[in-house]
Image (cartoon, grey):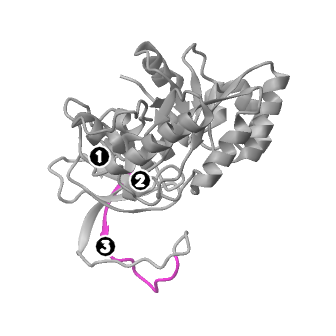
Amino acid sequence: MAVSKVFCADLELMNIMIEEEVDYLADSRIENLKGISSDIPKVLLRLPSISFAEDVVRHSDISLNSEIETIRVLNKYAKEQNKIHGVILMIDLGDLREGIFRKDEVFETIEHVTKLNHIKLSGIGTNLTCYGGVIPTHDKLVELVDFKTEIEQKFNLKLDIISGGNSSDLELVIEDRIPFGINNIRLGEGIVLGRETAYGTYLENMYLDVFTLEAEIIELKEKPSVPIGEIGMNAFGKIPTFIDKGTRLRAILAIGKQDVDHGELIPIDLIQILGSSSDHLIVDVSESNKLFEVGDILKFRLTYGSILSLMTSKYVGKHYE
C-alpha cells in the first residue's frame, strides 16, 4: 500500500504512484481519498469515525477497523450504496495504538463481522513503532501470522490481506526475514524519504531530497545574540534561554511555526537555526561561506513531520521539478 498522507494526497504525486501501479492507494484522511480518481483500490488507514462512515464507504474500498459498532454502521451505509466494503481488522501486538488487544475480543468481533452482508473481512493487520516504538521483529510479526492461521481455521474463511505494518518493516523485507504469511505493508516514509523507520536507516538507491523547503531572506542584519531587556514569555508562552556569542549576522526567513516546526528542518547551507515565531524563521548565517543578500533563498532538507506540516499549510507554495 502506497501511503499518501504525508503529502496530503497531492494529485501531482498521486499520479506518479498510480503510474507505478501500486497495489493499493492508502491515506489516513477520507478527505484526501475523495480527490483520488483511480481504479486502484483505496484504503482508509485511520480508524473510521462513525460520523464519517457514509463517506468512508463512498470514497474508500477498504478501511482499517477495530470497533464492531463502527463496522455495523459501515455495513448500513454499504447496504444503502449497494456495495461490499472491505475491512482489515487491526490487532494490537503491543504498540498500544489502534487494534484489538484481547484475543477473545478478536474472535468475538470476527464472529459478528461474518454476519454482516455488506462487509467483507479482507484481512487482519497490525501497527508498530508509531506510538509505543515497538520494533517489528520476526517473532513479533509471527504473532500476526498465528492469528491468521487460527482465524482461518476457526471460521473456515480465507484472509486475503495480512498487513504487517509500515516502513519500519522494510529492514525485515530487505533482509528476507519477514515471516511467511505477511503479504502486505503500508509504505509512506520509505517512499518519500527513502528510509526505514525502525532504526532510521537510509535505503540503497533511494533519494533523500525528494522534498526540500526553500525560504526567502526578508531581513539580514548584525545583531546581538542575546535579547536586551528583562526576559519573559515569548509568543508561545515559553521562557527562552540564550547563549551569548556576541554580535552575529542573522537572517529572517519568510516561514514560521504556523507552517513548520523549525526543529524538523535540516539546513543544507552552513547555518544555525536559532528559532521561530508564527511567521518568521531566524537563522545565524555568520559561519556560512556564502555572502547572502535580502531576497536570497535558503534550502532545507525535511523530516517526515516537516513534510506533513508544510504540505498541509496553505501558505506554502508547492513546485515540481
The disc labelled 3 sits on which kind of residue?
Answer: Pro
- Element marked by disc 3: strand
Q: Is residue 203 left or right of residue 315?
A: left
Residue lying furthest right in this view? Answer: 80
User: Residue 68: horizontal and vertical position, in percent?
Assistant: 73, 45
Marks 1,2: beta carbons within 8 A: no
For residue 12, side relative to residue 207 (left or right): right
Between label 3 and label 2, give the one nearer the viewer. 2
Tell me the mark number nearer the camera, choosing from 1 and 2.
2
Calculate the distance from the C-alpha at mark 3 to the C-alpha at mark 2: 43 Å
Q: Is residue 27 visible?
A: no
Q: Categorize mark 2 by other alpha carbons within 10 Å: few (<14), some (14-19), many (20+).
A: many
* Coordinates of residue 121 in the picture (x, y in percent): 63, 31
N-terminal of the pair, mark 1 or mark 2, is 2
Q: Is residue 114 in the magenta section? A: no
Task: Please identify the residue farthest to the bottom as the structure is shown.
Answer: 230
Q: Is residue 143 visible?
A: yes
Instruction: Locate the C terminus by quadrant.
Output: top left
Q: Quadrant of residue 208?
A: top left
Q: CA distance from mark 1 to mark 2?
A: 43 Å
Q: CA distance from mark 1 to mark 3?
A: 19 Å
> What residue sits right under mark 3 in the picture?
224
Disc 1 is placed on an element classified as: loop
- The residue shown at (55%, 69%) is 235
